[in-house]
Image: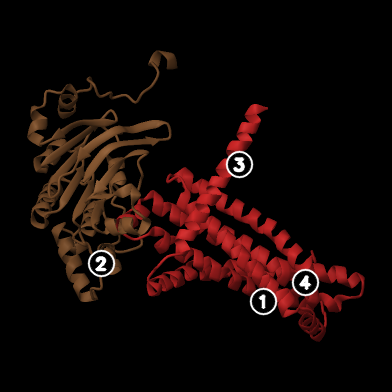
């Protein structure tokens, strides 16, 4: 996947100003950066839910913004996405949520669907919850169900938006291992957006750090740790002062008082 | 002055842009290939939600409006000794005007606002986005069944409203005020023409159904996904749909009955 010189604005606010990066096939790529730098926005641009104001994003050689509506939906069938909120269908049970992509896109009979759904839910540790509805689950459990749904069709590429939020240490460990195993066993291209920096870097093969509307670093996790760039160092060590501003742009507080 | 003109221009452009977006959403929702069996089932499910569940308010309102018409009509007609024409007055008022219009207004308040809130909440909780990522077009899966359900349900609800209203008129006129039952029903039967009255009422209902449901699904699909956004959109659905129904009713009446 290639991201070339992407410019994107929300109203007057510039989110990206010439963002260029690449996501290697079959690897786990971590997208990290301070809050509000547009990491989730990048996932939405990659999946064609948003269009850049300039520049181009190509997935498997296809320019996403130039795809017609049907071709775009065909491309999305080859992608899986885990949303930050889980985004489960609230009126469907856990089982039906995971079965939904299978029912829509395959001709599998009920018995096979039950088998596949049970396997996916077993992988995220929630096979016992298949008759519950989403509102009966915690936020962390909902995200695990959403993960099972995202991998139901065995996509070629999967994007995780904050998959580790709300997970206890056991769930976190299982999910980290699952993301790694999915990547290795199925040869998936994985993109992980996360603030759990150390955990994410522990499984990532490639890191893209976004800050101040551009890519601040791109390379391996080892190179990132060794980088002497002040911005990277500030982010890695969580220092309040440095090139990344903690405060949203504002006039001096003296003027406001 | 320049500022005022700029403001008017900006507002006009914004309204035209909204109309264009709403048209695109409707066209994309109702055209294109789809799995007919699945979409038919989804549409029938929605007919239950927007149509069957609106029955109680339609029946109760129809009954009371028919009863009020019977009471008011009798008072006026009795002054001229024409109370035998009560059935004609009740039936024509309901078939030509009150049936389609009041049903559409009630439908906008009951089902239209619910459609907007439901689609809006699906947007706010990223369910529409997750459908897109599963490779399912939310316009075909979510918007189209709701739109068709509205278009199917409202004319049927309108016919039920008119029927119940006629019974309400009879209840007051015949059973309470003593109008002759034979005159009441015979006058009604003789004066109401299928092509002029019933068919025009149905046409009005279909037009109102398209407009009200279109406004409802567009407001839901296009809203700002916040609690305030949902609140504003549901209000807009009721206000815009009600104004559209009342405005369109005048034009349709002028075309159908005004001989212009």
| Residue linked to disc 2 | A102
* Residue B61 shows in the view: no
Say which quarter of the image contains residue A99: bottom left
The answer to whether the residue labelled 2 contacts the one labelled 1, judged by CB atoms less than 8 Å apart, is no
Report how far apart the C-alphas of labels 2 and 1 lie in the structure: 46 Å
Taking depth in this image into account, of A48 and A154 the one nearest to the observer is A48
What hue represents chain A?
A: brown
Q: Which mark is residue B12?
A: 3
Q: Earlier in the sequence, mark 1 or mark 3?
A: 3
* Chain for numbered disc 4: B
What hue represents chain B?
A: red
Say left or right for B224 vs A127: right
Residue that appears at 68% across and 27% down: B1
Q: Are marks 2 and 1 on the same chain?
A: no
The secondary element bearing badge 3 is classed as: helix
Q: Position of residue A82 (x, y in %)?
A: 25, 51
Q: Earlier in the sequence, mark 3 or mark 4?
A: 3
Taking depth in this image into account, of B191 and B178 the one nearest to the observer is B191
Above or below: residue B231 compared with residue A231: below
Callout 1: few (<14), some (14-19), or many (20+) C-alpha neighbours within 10 Å? many
Residue that appears at 36% across and 23% down: A249
* Chain for numbered disc 2: A
Q: Nearer the viewer, mark 3 or mark 4?
A: 3
Above or below: residue B188 compared with residue B151: below
Residue that extends furthest to the bottom in the rendered view of this protein: B182
Q: Nearer the viewer, mark 2 or mark 3?
A: 3
* Chain for numbered disc 1: B
Q: Which mark is residue A39?
A: none
Q: Which mark is residue B70?
A: 4
Q: Quadrant of the C terminus of chain A?
A: top left
């Amino acid at each position: 996947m290639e991201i070339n010189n992407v410019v994107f604005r929300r109203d007057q606010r510039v989110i990206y100003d010439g963002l260029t990066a690449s996501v290697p096939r079959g690897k786990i790529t971590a997208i990290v950066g301070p809050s509000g730098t547009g990491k989730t926005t990048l996932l939405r641009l990659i999946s064609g839910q948003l269009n850049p104001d300039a520049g181009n994003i190509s997935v498997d050689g296809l320019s996403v913004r130039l795809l017609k509506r049907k071709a775009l939906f065909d491309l999305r069938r080859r992608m899986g996405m885990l949303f930050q909120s889980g985004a489960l269908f609230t009126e469907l049970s856990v089982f039906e949520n995971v079965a939904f992509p299978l029912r829509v896109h395959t001709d599998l009979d009920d018995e096979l669907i039950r088998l596949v759904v049970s396997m996916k839910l077993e992988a995220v540790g929630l096979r016992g919850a298949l008759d519950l509805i989403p509102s009966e689950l915690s936020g962390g459990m909902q995200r695990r169900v959403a993960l099972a749904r995202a991998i139901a069709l065995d996509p070629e590429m999967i994007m995780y938006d904050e998959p580790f939020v709300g997970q206890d240490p056991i769930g976190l460990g299982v999910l980290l291992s699952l993301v790694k195993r999915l990547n290795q066993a199925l040869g998936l291209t994985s993109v992980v957006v996360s603030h759990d920096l150390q955990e994410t870097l522990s499984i990532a093969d490639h890191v893209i750090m976004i800050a101040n509307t551009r890519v601040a670093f791109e390379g391996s996790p080892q190179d990132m740790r060794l980088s002497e760039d002040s911005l990277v160092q500030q982010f890695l060590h969580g220092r309040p002062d440095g090139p990344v501003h903690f405060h949203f742009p504002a006039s001096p507080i003296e003027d406001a008082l | 002055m320049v500022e005022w003109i700029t403001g008017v221009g900006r507002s006009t452009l914004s309204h035209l842009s909204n109309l264009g977006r709403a048209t695109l959403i409707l066209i994309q929702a109702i055209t294109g290939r789809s799995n007919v069996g699945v979409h038919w089932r989804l549409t029938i499910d929605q007919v239950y939600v927007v149509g069957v569940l609106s029955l109680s308010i339609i029946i109760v309102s129809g009954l009371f409006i028919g009863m009020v018409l019977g009471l008011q009509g009798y008072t006026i007609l009795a002054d001229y000794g024409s109370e035998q024409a009560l059935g004609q007055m009740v039936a024509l008022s309901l078939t030509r005007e009150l049936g389609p219009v009041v049903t559409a207004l009630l439908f906008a308040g009951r089902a239209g606002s619910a459609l907007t809130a439901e689609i809006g909440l699906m947007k706010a909780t990223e369910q529409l986005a997750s459908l897109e990522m599963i490779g399912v077009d939310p316009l075909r899966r979510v918007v189209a069944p709701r739109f068709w359900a509205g278009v199917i349900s409202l004319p049927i609800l309108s016919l039920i409203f008119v029927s119940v209203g006629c019974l309400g008129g009879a209840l007051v006129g015949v059973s309470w005020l003593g109008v002759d039952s034979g005159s009441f029903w015979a006058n009604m039967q003789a004066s109401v023409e299928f092509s002029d009255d019933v068919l025009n009422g149905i046409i009005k209902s279909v037009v109102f159904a398209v407009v009200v449901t279109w406004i409802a699904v567009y407001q839901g699909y296009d809203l700002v996904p916040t609690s305030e956004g949902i609140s504003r959109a549901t209000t807009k659905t009721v206000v815009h749909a009600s104004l559209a129904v009342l405005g369109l009713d005048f034009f349709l009446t002028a075309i159908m009955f005004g001989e212009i």
